[in-house]
Every structure is written in C-alpha cells, then in structure tokens.
Image: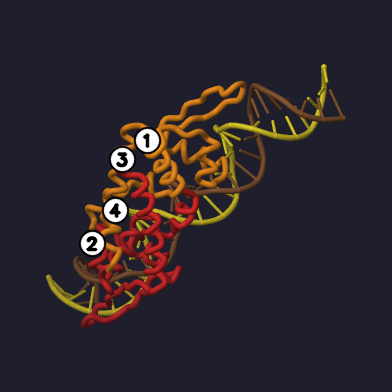
Chain colours: A red, B orange, C brown, D yellow
DNA sequence: TATTATACTTTGAAATTCAAAGTCAATATA
DNA sequence: TATATTGACTTTGAATTTCAAAGTATAATA
C-alpha cells in the first residue's frame, strides 16, 4: 500500500493540474483559451497552476502571435509525460484494488 | 472533460485520505496502528486527515478498549464508500483517456 | 482619445498540510 | 510510592497552497 501511495505525485493531486496534464497527454499542444474552456476554470486558476507545472518542467509554455494578439500555447515535456504516467499507474493500482470490493 | 473533473472530490485529492479510503473499502475496519503502518505516515498526519474524513461523514471513528489500552477503529460509511466510488470512477475515466496515447 | 475588449499574470486572504509538541492513562523503574 | 517512560492518540501553528479578484499590457472600437 505505502509503495503505491509513494508513487502519488503531489503536483498532480490538484485536479486542475490533473486536468491540464491529461489534456496535454491527448493533445500535443493546447492554447490558453481552449484549455480554460476545456477545464471550465478561471483565468487565474489556469495561469497559476500552469506555472506550477512549468516550474517542475512538466510542461512548456510558449507565447506566439496570432495576428496581433498573443496566444499562450501549452505542451507537456517528456519528463512531464513520464511523471504523469507513473502517477496514473499508481492511481490505477489503487482503483483496481478498491473497486468491485 | 470538465464533467469528469467536476466528479473529482477535493476531500480525496490528498493522498493520505485517498489511502485511508482505499484501505477502508477493502477492510471493513482498521485500527490506528495498522492504518499508520499501512500508509507509513506520522501519527499527526493520520489523526488530522481521519478527522477531515469524519467531519465529512465519510468514515466513523470509534474508540474501544483492548485490555486497558484504548484503540481507535476506523470504518467507512455508506456515503463515504459511495462518494469514493464516484471519485475513483472519475479517475478511471481520466486514466482511460490518457494512457496508451 | 476615451473606453471597452482580449489575453493573460500577480496578489494575497483564506484554506490546507503535517510534524512537533501536547495530553492522558497505564506501566515500568528507582 | 514517587516518578519516569511508554503507548495511543490529538492539537497546534508555521509553512505551504489555493484560486478569484485585481492588475497589466496591448488592440480594437466608439
């Protein structure tokens, strides 16, 4: 049990960050607006949680110009994807040992 | 996506509480010592997180005497089990949509 | 040239975390 | 028989985290 719990990554415990990572596993890149509407959260919440993931080097944040407007593009790093998989596998084990009991 | 994320229960985001609930889904009752060693956490951490679950009525905390020593016994309530299942099903959907991609 | 809109970021009050310190009864030791 | 010490927790509070309101910067519009 403790071995599985130890695989739980504190950074991914937060549901916004869980959502960001999940979205970035399926989509190679997503912009701010899209991610915000996908997760249905406030600007501040997305921005600050994305910063947490960036600080851990789990995602990359790039700013581009679409015409004259800026656009912020998010993508997961390889280490972010790997760390997230470890986290999900731990959750999967917990689920497997818990449901249908 | 937001519909799934909305099913994530803030109380169960914390890994100690996730571990407590998971253990109490599989075992009808567990005592303090057993749970502490199962999760490998400090006394204070177990005690305060169990209190959070009790306040939500997700678990019951009973004190018994084993000889002349007190023993604290934890068990999940029906509503606790139900809430935990909802949480795990949401995680399961995220995992299913995320892994092997 | 205001004013409003777009696209975020920063700030900080409120909530949460978790180990150290505290409580309290039982038992061992001097 | 005082008085440590142990066992089984609980409480406290400093440190960290959360997240929406306020702020910033540029562009479009009236």
Whether labels 4 and 1 share one chain: yes
Task: Determine whether label 1 and label 3 are within 8 Å by CB.
Answer: yes
Q: Which mark is residue B43?
A: none
Helix, strand or loop at label 1? It is: loop
**Labelled disc at residue B83:** 3
Residue C30: % across, % down:
87, 30
Q: Nearer the viewer, residue C19 or A101?
A: A101
Q: Nearer the viewer, mark 4 or mark 1?
A: 4
Disc nearest the viewer among 1 and 2: 1
Give the quarter of the figure containing the N terminus of chain B.
Answer: bottom left
- Above or below residue B28? Residue A3 is below
What chain does badge 3 belong to? Answer: B
Within-10-Å neighbours for mark 1: few <14, some 14–19, many 20+: many
Q: Check residue B92 in the rendering and tell me which mark sits there, or answer none.
A: 4
Q: Position of residue A29 (x, y in %)?
A: 28, 74
Say above or below: B96 vs B77. below
Which residue does the numbered mark 2 point to in the structure image? A38
Q: CA distance from mark 3 to mark 2?
A: 24 Å
Residue C13's spot in the image, x, y percent?
Answer: 44, 49
Can marks 1 and 3 be said to lie on one chain?
A: yes
Mark 4 on the same chain as mark 2: no
List the residue tagged with mark 1: B58
- Distance in Å between CA atoms under marks 4 and 1: 21 Å
In the picture shown, does residue A24 fall above or below A96? below
Q: Are marks 4 and 3 on the same chain?
A: yes
Q: Residues within 10 Å of mark 2 (few under 14, many from 20)?
A: some
């Amino acid at each position: 049990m403790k071995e599985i719990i130890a695989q739980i990554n504190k950074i991914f415990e937060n549901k916004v960050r869980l959502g960001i990572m999940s979205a970035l596993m399926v989509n190679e890149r997503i912009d701010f607006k899209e991610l915000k509407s996908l997760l249905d959260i406030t600007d501040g919440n997305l921005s600050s949680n994305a910063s947490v993931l960036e600080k851990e080097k789990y995602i990359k944040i790039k700013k581009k110009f679409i015409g004259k407007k800026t656009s912020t593009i998010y993508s997961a790093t390889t280490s972010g994807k790997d760390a997230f998989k470890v986290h999900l596998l731990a959750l999967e084990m917990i689920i497997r040992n818990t449901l249908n009991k």
